[in-house]
Image (cartoon, rainbow, N blue to C red):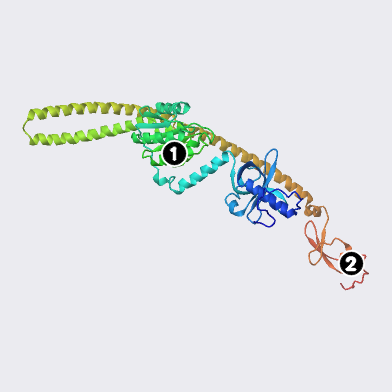
């Protein structure tokens, strides 16, 4: 018992005005709350969620009119800490208490789970994990569906569109398959027991395959297919089972345990209903192979019969009768073979005619004509391009000649170069007596600077 708490939290204050400290008041209030509300379930929405490094979780649980602080300590928070978020509707279990340090009224929680559909989701995940750990979902235990089933059992409601859709698919694709309905409820309180019973009855009837089907609905509507008894009944069946529960987006425990999961009941029927056209084609192929084998067998038997005839002398009449029958069968077989061969020849001639009409030679001629036209266009384009290039080059040559310094020299001008070959642009760059090269329009001259009008002239008379 904490200091300041009284033995009986309901004990009233003394009439002679007992004075309590704040700590005593909060202690008595906490004891009273925890004794009266030792364990309560409260539903609301999470807000102001806080996840400190200590591992504890604190949040406010609110509804449209009120709110209460909640504390979920580390030991209880480990499983749900990451799943909690603001705005999540939850159901919490705990005791009502008081944080004495601040006098805050709060709930000390030991369990948090989503409200409404979330509780079913948690149960779904828990059962899924349990059955998966037991190996009920493993591919090793799943059975392959028969390629050509003769008898198929349907476990579903006798009313509604599901059974009509399945029957329609089988009538269209495989009318020879015998269908048997094992009726059961697929929703409601009694659905689980009825589905388990129907699975046991269907498994004992020796069907080639079973279809467990139901139309779409909410999670609550489909919940009987998420019950553990149904899952174990499916796993115990020796007959291959196709699960077609709900719409394509719906997933149930039955889907995981069944040998094959179909997105819709119609798709489940298509998995077990072989296409009649494919069977006809396969039958035709088998018939042809049978005819060939019969022909070979008859030939061998005829040779064998000839040998027996040579070895056996009696009873000759009976052997002649058998030989006559064999000849008759041989003639019938040959006529049938010739008819079939004639049909094949006609078919081959028809295909040859079609092939000739689609021969690529036509396209080759068109492509050749197009190639010739493109070649002519290319030559014309090249000629036009070369002509344009020549005109442009001639224009450029004229322009270059017009601005060329050689043309300037041809008009009587010259270029003075010093001994290093640099052009003289300023008289100040020369000195009296300096020899320069004058480049003319035709030829060159060596000249000497007599006076540049910048330095005094002191030329030697002997130069």
Q: Which comes sooner in the sequence, label 2 or label 1?
A: 1
* In this picture, residue 448 sits left or right of residue 374: right
Q: Is residue 274 visible?
A: no
Residue underneath mark 2: 450
The relative height of residue 47 versus residue 162 in the rendered view (above or below) is below
Q: Residue 129's spot in the image, x, y percent?
A: 49, 47
Give the foreground label among 2 and 1. 1
Q: Nearer the viewer, residue 176 or 311?
A: 176
Q: Residue 387's spot in the image, x, y percent?
A: 66, 41
* In this picture, residue 388 sits left or right of residue 186: right
The relative height of residue 148 versus residue 72 in the rendered view (above or below) is above
Kindly identify the residue that appears in the image at 43 percent across and 35 percent down: 193
Q: Is residue 350 visible?
A: yes
Question: Which of the 4 quarters of the picture holds residue 449?
Answer: bottom right
Specify the quadrant that holds the C terminus. Answer: bottom right
Q: Residues within 10 Å of mark 1 (few under 14, many from 20)?
A: many
Label 2, label 1: how far apart the Cα atoms are = 127 Å
Q: Nearer the viewer, residue 224 or 18?
A: 18
Kindly identify the residue that appears in the image at 61 percent across and 44 percent down: 40
Q: Residue 288's spot in the image, x, y percent?
A: 29, 32
Q: Nearer the viewer, residue 441 or 372?
A: 372
Kindly identify the residue that appears in the image at 14 percent across and 27 percent down: 324
* In this picture, residue 53 sits left or right of residue 21: left
Q: Secondary structure at mark 2?
A: loop
Residue underneath mark 1: 230
Q: Residue furthest front?
A: 16
Q: Secondary structure at mark 1?
A: helix
């Amino acid at each position: 018992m904490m200091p300041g708490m009284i033995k009986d939290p309901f004990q009233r204050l003394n009439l002679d005005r007992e004075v309590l400290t704040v700590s005593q008041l909060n202690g008595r209030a906490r004891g009273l709350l925890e004794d009266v509300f030792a364990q309560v379930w409260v539903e609301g929405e999470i807000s102001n969620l806080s996840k400190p490094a200590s591992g504890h979780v604190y949040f406010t649980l609110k509804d449209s009119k009120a709110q209460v602080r909640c504390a979920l300590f580390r030991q209880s928070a480990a499983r749900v800490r990451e799943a909690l978020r603001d705005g999540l509707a939850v159901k919490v279990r705990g005791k009502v208490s008081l944080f004495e340090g601040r006098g805050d009224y709060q709930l000390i929680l030991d369990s948090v789970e989503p409200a409404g559909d979330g509780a079913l989701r948690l149960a779904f995940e828990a059962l899924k994990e349990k059955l998966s750990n037991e190996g009920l979902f493993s591919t090793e235990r799943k059975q392959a569906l028969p390629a050509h089933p003769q008898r198929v059992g349907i476990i579903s409601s006798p009313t509604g569109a599901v059974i009509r859709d399945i029957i329609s698919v089988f009538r269209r694709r495989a009318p020879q398959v015998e269908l048997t309905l094992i009726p059961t409820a697929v929703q409601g309180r009694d659905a689980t027991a009825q589905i388990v019973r129907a699975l046991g009855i269907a498994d004992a009837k020796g069907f080639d395959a079973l279809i467990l089907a139901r139309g779409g609905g909410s999670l609550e509507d489909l919940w009987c297919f998420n019950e553990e008894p149904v899952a174990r009944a499916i796993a115990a069946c020796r007959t291959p089972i196709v699960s077609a529960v709900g719409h394509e987006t719906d997933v149930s425990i039955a889907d995981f345990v069944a040998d094959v999961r179909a997105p819709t009941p119609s798709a489940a029927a298509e998995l077990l209903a072989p296409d009649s056209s494919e069977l006809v084609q396969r039958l035709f192929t088998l018939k042809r192979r049978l005819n060939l084998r019969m022909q070979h067998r008859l030939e061998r038997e005829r040779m064998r019969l000839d040998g027996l005839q040579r070895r056996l002398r009696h009873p000759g009449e009976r052997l002649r009768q058998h030989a006559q029958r064999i000849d008759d069968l041989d003639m019938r077989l040959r006529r049938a073979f010739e008819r079939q061969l004639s049909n094949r020849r006609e078919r081959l001639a028809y295909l040859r005619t079609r092939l000739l009409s689609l021969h690529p030679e036509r396209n080759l001629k068109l492509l050749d004509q197009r190639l010739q036209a493109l070649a002519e266009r290319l030559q014309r384009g090249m000629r036009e391009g070369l002509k344009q290039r020549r005109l442009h080059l001639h224009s450029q040559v004229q322009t270059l000649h017009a601005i060329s310094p050689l043309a300037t020299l041809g008009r009587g001008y010259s270029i003075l170069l010093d001994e290093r070959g640099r052009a003289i642009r300023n008289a100040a760059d020369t000195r009296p007596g300096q020899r320069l090269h004058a480049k003319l329009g035709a030829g060159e001259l060596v000249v000497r600077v007599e006076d540049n009008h910048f330095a005094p002239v002191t030329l030697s008379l002997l130069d």
